[in-house]
Image: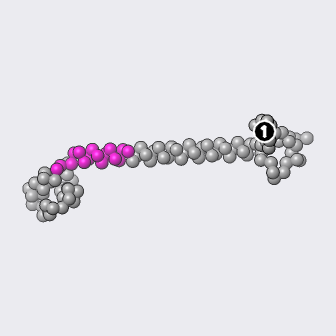
């Protein structure tokens, strides 16, 4: 007679219960199936945590790069002087980002 491992249905039965294969019903949960499902859930949670950590690291790196770019960017007055020197039409009342976009890339830093 072949026995199989199923999940326990009462306290104190341990990690699994051995039953005869012919006694298996749809009420039983195979121990190996349960362990596989748990392992898959743990792996899925690990992958989600890893993806979240990666996304957070990328967002932090982008924020740091943007902050560094802002520090290196010339002031609005400097941008206006560069635009005038390059004879580029501009609205002095425009915001700094719009004025900076008018400059050639090599003059934006």
Residue 64 in the image: state x and y as whole percent.
32, 44
SS type, badge 1 = loop
Magenta-highlighted residues: 60-75
Residue 62 in the image: state x and y as whole percent.
35, 47
State whether residue 106 appears in this view: no
74 or 88, which is in the foreground?
A: 74
Location of residue 14 (image quadrant)? top right
* Tag 1 residue: 11
Residue 58 in the image: state x and y as whole percent.
40, 46
Local crowd size for mark 1, using a 10 Å CA cut-off: few (<14), some (14–19), many (≥20) = few
In the image, taking residue 86 as reference, residue 69 lies left or right, namely right
Image point (18%, 61%), residue name: 94
State whether residue 11 appears in this view: yes
64 or 9, which is in the foreground?
A: 9
Residue 42 in the image: state x and y as whole percent.
61, 43
**Extreme residue toward the front, this view:** 11
Question: Which secondary structure type mostly characterizes the magenta part of the structure?
Answer: helix
| Residue 44 lies within the magenta run | no
Image point (30%, 48%), residue name: 66
Q: Quadrant of the N terminus?
A: top right
In the image, taking residue 83 as reference, residue 31 lies left or right, namely right
């Amino acid at each position: 007679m072949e026995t199989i491992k199923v999940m326990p249905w009462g306290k104190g039965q341990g990690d699994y219960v051995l039953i005869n294969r012919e006694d298996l019903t749809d009420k039983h949960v195979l121990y190996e199936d349960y362990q596989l499902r748990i392992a898959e859930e743990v792996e899925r949670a690990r992958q989600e945590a890893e993806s979240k950590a990666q996304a957070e690291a990328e967002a932090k790196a982008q924020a740091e790069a943007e902050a560094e770019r802002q520090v290196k960017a010339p002031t609005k007055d400097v941008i206006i002087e560069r635009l005038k020197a390059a004879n580029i039409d501009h609205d002095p009342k425009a915001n700094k980002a719009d004025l900076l976009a008018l400059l050639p890339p090599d003059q934006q830093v």
